[in-house]
Image (cartoon, grey):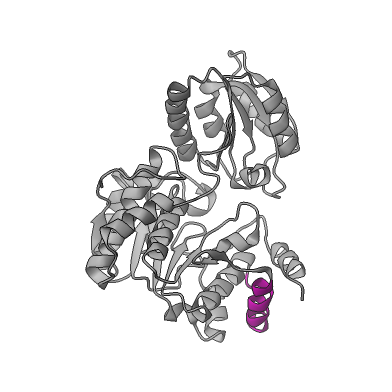
């Protein structure tokens, strides 16, 4: 089978209704000889920041000379981005090779479950020293939650996927804290009610709880945004915990260099002088984005913000648009190729209700690249075009 046919088949397994649960993935891995049990994993959950924290941990381990694996989702542009070891994404040929190794054991598994099984086998056969594993959705019933990691990491917790995880911070925290394992240390960057839930579950499971500590500032070479300093504190606390509890030797210079080198595309990323792309895709992510845009406005003397926005159907579009509408001079609503993308007409209707007393220009352009080109055309020399609302949208325009 050609890798393109395999990807087409895998994508065909994606359904609008996500089926959480560990039974299907566990059955598949049992038939494969349980490669996940032979890996040393760092398991990372959270509402926002988990991808950036995963990237920082990966770059530090790689800088230290370890064979570091990284499993993240979704991808921005290509499936290959989901599975990488050291400096290399899984190749097209390897996608075909590892799918064919898993295929004889597949019964009723989903796209994400099969992909996760492929990743476990890939990392095992490539002799990864450590694997940084990002939770797909939630934690407790996520397909990645079949491992006993070296440490668990929970970044922050906000309202997201409420139809699956619950409609309160406490319920969502309970699901995210489902990655906490008996006697396995957990590093937490969460606060307030969410932290109380994490503390309770950590105590029940006798899991040592380490709260993210502030560290000295490290200037990133590729990342911007004050929120990345919070992610850095979580990542550094996790590295310190690994060093103390698992005798992993990484000197301070190597840690600093790994953090400096970290790249994570589509996170507050200038793709040209006056175009900023950000994968913020929920209300808490948009609140962070708004804060960062106000900082950028002051730093760069920005006059107006022209937004290109596409949002997925399962997100709270009203809350997201309320947050950024005070900054907008123009809004262009668009739609990624994702089947779960909201129709721009719906987003425009929501926006009109929110901004009825404000003179903000709004337009629908279905194609994201055409929407971006239009935004560039109407933006003045001192304006900034901001594309945000969905990882899928950002992936199509960068």
Q: Decide: is 146 above or below 15.
A: below
The part of the image, by quadrant, that contains residue 330 is top right
Residue at (42, 59) in percent of width and height: 59
Q: Which sits in the foreground, 121 or 11?
A: 121
The part of the image, by quadrant, that contains residue 288 is top left
Q: Which sits in the foreground, 136 or 273?
A: 273
Q: Position of residue 394 (x, y in %)?
A: 62, 43
Q: Position of residue 136 (x, y in %)?
A: 52, 59
Whether residue 174 is visible: no
- Magenta part mainly helix, strand or loop? helix
Horizontally, residue 251 falls left or right of residue 64, namely left
Q: Position of residue 140 (x, y in %)?
A: 43, 63
Horizontally, residue 317 falls left or right of residue 238, namely right
Residue at (69, 21) in percent of width and height: 378
Whether residue 309 is visible: yes
- Is residue 328 located in the magenta-colored stretch of the structure? no
For the image shown, how many numbered marks are present on the structure? 0
Magenta range is: 93-109
Q: Which sits in the foreground, 131 or 191?
A: 131
């Amino acid at each position: 089978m050609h890798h393109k046919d395999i990807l087409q088949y895998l994508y065909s397994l994606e359904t609008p209704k996500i089926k959480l649960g560990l039974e299907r993935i566990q059955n598949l891995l049992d038939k494969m000889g349980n490669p996940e049990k032979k890996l040393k994993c760092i398991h990372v959950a959270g509402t926002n920041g988990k991808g950036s924290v995963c990237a920082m941990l990966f770059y530090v381990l790689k800088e230290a000379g370890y064979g570091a694996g990284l499993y993240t989702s979704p991808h921005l542009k290509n499936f290959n981005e989901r599975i990488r070891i050291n400096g290399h994404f899984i190749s097209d040929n390897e996608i075909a090779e590892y799918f064919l190794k898993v295929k004889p054991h597949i019964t009723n598994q989903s796209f994400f479950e099969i992909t996760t099984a492929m990743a476990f086998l890939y990392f095992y056969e490539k002799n990864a020293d450590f694997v940084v594993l990002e939770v797909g959705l939630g934690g407790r019933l996520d397909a990645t939650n079949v491992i006993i990691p070296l440490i668990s990491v929970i970044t922050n917790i906000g309202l997201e996927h409420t139809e699956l995880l619950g409609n309160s911070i406490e319920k969502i925290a309970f699901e995210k804290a489902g990655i906490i394992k008996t006697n396995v240390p957990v590093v937490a960057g969460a606060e307030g009610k969410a932290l109380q839930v994490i503390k309770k579950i950590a105590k029940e499971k006798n899991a040592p709880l380490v709260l993210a500590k502030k560290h000295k500032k490290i200037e990133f070479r590729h990342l911007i945004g004050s929120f990345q300093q919070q992610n850095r504190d979580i990542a550094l606390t996790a590295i310190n915990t690994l060093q103390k509890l698992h005798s992993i030797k990484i000197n301070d210079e190597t840690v600093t260099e790994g953090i400096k080198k970290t790249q994570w595309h589509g996170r507050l990323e200038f793709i040209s002088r006056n175009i900023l792309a950000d994968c913020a895709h929920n209300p808490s992510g948009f609140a962070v984005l708004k804060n960062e845009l106000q900082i950028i406005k002051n730093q760069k003397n920005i006059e107006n913000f022209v937004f290109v926005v596409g949002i997925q159907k399962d997100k709270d579009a009203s809350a997201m648009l309320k947050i950024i509408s005070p900054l907008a001079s123009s809004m262009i609503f668009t739609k990624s190729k994702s089947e779960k993308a909201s129709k721009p007409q719906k987003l425009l209707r929501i926006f009109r209700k929110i901004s009825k007393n404000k003179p903000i220009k709004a337009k629908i352009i279905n194609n994201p690249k055409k929407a971006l080109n239009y935004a560039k055309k109407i933006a003045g020399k001192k304006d900034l075009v901001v594309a945000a609302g969905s990882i899928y949208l950002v992936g199509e325009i960068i």
